[in-house]
Amino acid sequence: MKSKQILMLSILLLAATAIETRAQSQDRDNPTPLTANAIQGNGSGKKLEYYYSFTAGPGELVVTVDLKAKSGSTNADVEIFDEDASKILYLYPNATSQNERSVKRVTLNSKQTLTLRLAFDSSAGAYSIKLAGPVELAVPVATPDAATPSVDTATASASAESSAAVVQPDPAAAVPTEAATEVAPKPGKGSKFDLGVNLFQTVGTQFGLPTSGMLHIVMKDGTTQDIDLSKVKSASVSKQ
């Protein structure tokens, strides 16, 4: 169970990393769908370029940009393209270590999917781009709860069934009978039973099994096996 939980957490960690990377797409042909009307962040000390997509219109779209430099001065590119890749809005703000705000508006005649391009130089500090107007945002993708990994109930049930063998003794057998010399048939492929050590040298004491009746075994793959205990001479269990 512990190993399954570790595996599940590893998968979720990889998924979270992929989502974080996806949230900052640098591929113009595969922009990140906006799930909020504001984008906020901080410069990383190197040039950055991100692409986002959203649906807007008809009506007036308002774009507000806040920008400041980590030190000295900085500038940025804020551009919006329509479905034909035509630039319909642009802002090229400049800022020092004090926050600078720029606002621009564009009227959209119809509802359409737009692409937002953001580019920052190595001196960029905190930045914020807000969209207002007839904007439709994408629905956020739900993230699984890492604290409660799901369990396949069918698998759990099969594991529980295969964890124990059910013995069905013969009610007519009042006293032990002499074991026949016939060796028990080999179990199916994948079984952990290995013939070799006599389990019945002392009848009914080593494993508490009778010397008559049917041993009913349910395998992990769902198959079953029945063994006539009166015909078993010896058997052993070896660790895998």
Image (cartoon, rainbow, N blue to C red):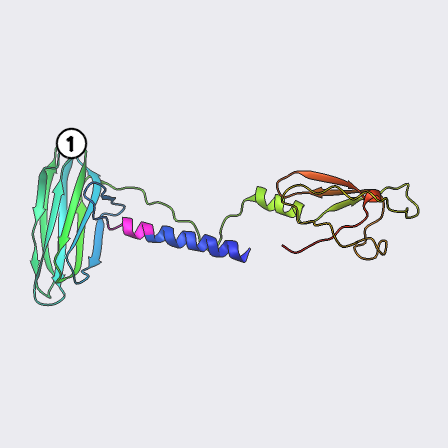
Horizontal relation, residue 50 to residue 173: left or right: left
- Disc tally is 1
Q: Disc 1 on helix, strand or loop?
A: loop
Residue closer to the observer: 92 or 37: 92
Residue closer to the observer: 21 or 191: 191
Q: Is the magenta region chiefly helix, strand or loop?
A: helix
Please provide percent x and percent y for residue 28: 18, 43
Horizontal relation, residue 98 to residue 193: left or right: left
Name, please, the residue furthest toward the bottom: 71
Magenta span of residues: 18-24
Residue at which label 1 appears: 110
Please provide percent x and percent y for residue 104: 9, 47
Q: Quadrant of the C terminus?
A: bottom right
**Above-or-below relation of 147 to 136:** below
Please provide percent x and percent y for residue 46: 16, 60
Q: Residue at x 62, y 45 (%)?
A: 190
